[in-house]
Amino acid sequence: MAALTHISLQLAASNQSDTLPPFQAGPFAAPSHAVRSTVLLFLSLAFSLGCALAAILVKQWAQNYLHATQRRPSPRLRAKIRSYLDEGVKRFQLQSLVEAIPTLLHISLFLFFGGLFEFFLPINPVLAYLDLAILVIGAGLYMTTALTGTLFRSCPYQSTLSSIFWYIMKGALPARWKVLQTAFLAQTPADSVELIATGGVDKENHEPMFESLFSNSQIRDEKALRWTLEALTDNDELEPFVSGIPGFIASDNAGNNYDIMRHFQEDDALQLDERIVGLLASSAYLPPTQQERRITIALTAMWSLLSASIKRGLEPVITEK
């Protein structure tokens, strides 16, 4: 702009036979509002691109997980692989990463509107303050929905910010948090859908990983089966589980598998024996065909557990002989 002004003065002076000293440009300094708007807009672009990259990576990890768990024909092996990979998902906090992806997009949106405000402010203040009003209203609604999702257990407006609010209220204000829990029926934000994504397991190309799949297999199997049994709420859901008990006990590692079932029998919370008896009693209310099938399933499971128990009790005697 200074150069154009100097050229105009030189042209005017040439008509009057006057001379002007040559133009000497000073050091360039960008206006502060231009620097602020540029920084905000480029940060917005960086966050949005980071969000896109993270989403692509999560999709790739999810595809690897599905490939690893679905390629095996054996349901037992698929269950073991799922349980093994689930430990890695929880250990490396994949859920936290997945929850952070929408947060990057939210930050990018607010940075973009902030950059627009800085850009329009010296040009057109009306547009700038209109943009600021949209930004303030949007931020207010965003904060309100996040806080509502923290206070009310049935509210569907859960987000990463809701989790942050919950930890702040519970950690910084423990006494008042109990009052809020009573007043608003608050609870922790509902768990996000956990996208289980990790690398595939291939026995030919990843032998060490495949071997570690079966280390501590009994503990991992018991955790998975315990979670499944706790999730079964009625007899129709329990019936397929009970029908698999004889095959589970008779399969490889029969001794370890029976130990798992025995733990479930001795657990007062699970009460496997009582639930099998309840399944048998519920057959009285079924049509004849379904009644016969349920009776067969329950009695076969009872006999399998009893036979394994007798066999386990006779093992010391057989060993001594």
Image (cartoon, grey):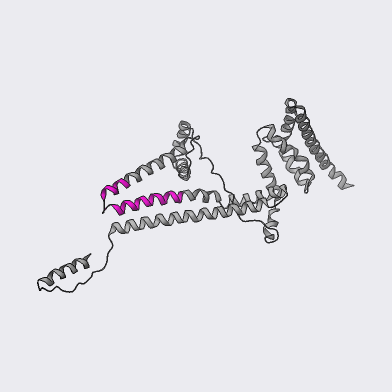
Q: Residue at x 29, y 47 (%)?
A: 129
**Residue 244 image-quadrant placement:** top right
Q: In this view, does 96 lie to the left or right of 123?
A: right
Most foreground residue, 165 or 76: 76
Query: Is residue 243 inside the magenta stretch?
Result: no
For the image, the number of numbered tags is 0
- In what quadrant of the picture does the N terminus appear? bottom left
Residue 288 lies, in percent from the top left, at: 77, 27
Query: Which residue is at a point 17% across and 67% down the rendered structure image?
Result: 8
Please give the range of residues in magenta: 103-131
| Left or right of residue 161, residue 290 in this image | right
Which residue lies at the image location 38% right of the left edge and 43% below the top edge?
A: 138
Where is residue 261, by image quadrant? top right
Front in this rendered view, residue 303 or 62:
62
Residue farthest to the front? 15
Give the vertical position of 235 relative to 26 (above or below): above
In this rendering, the answer to whether 270 lies above or below 90 is above
> Residue 30: x and y, percent?
28, 62
Q: Does the magenta stretch include residue 115?
A: yes
Residue pushed farthest left?
Answer: 16
Characterize the magenta stretch by its predominant secondary structure.
helix
Task: Work out which residue is located at the far top of the displayed protein and give it.
Answer: 285
- Give the x, y percent position of residue 168: 45, 43
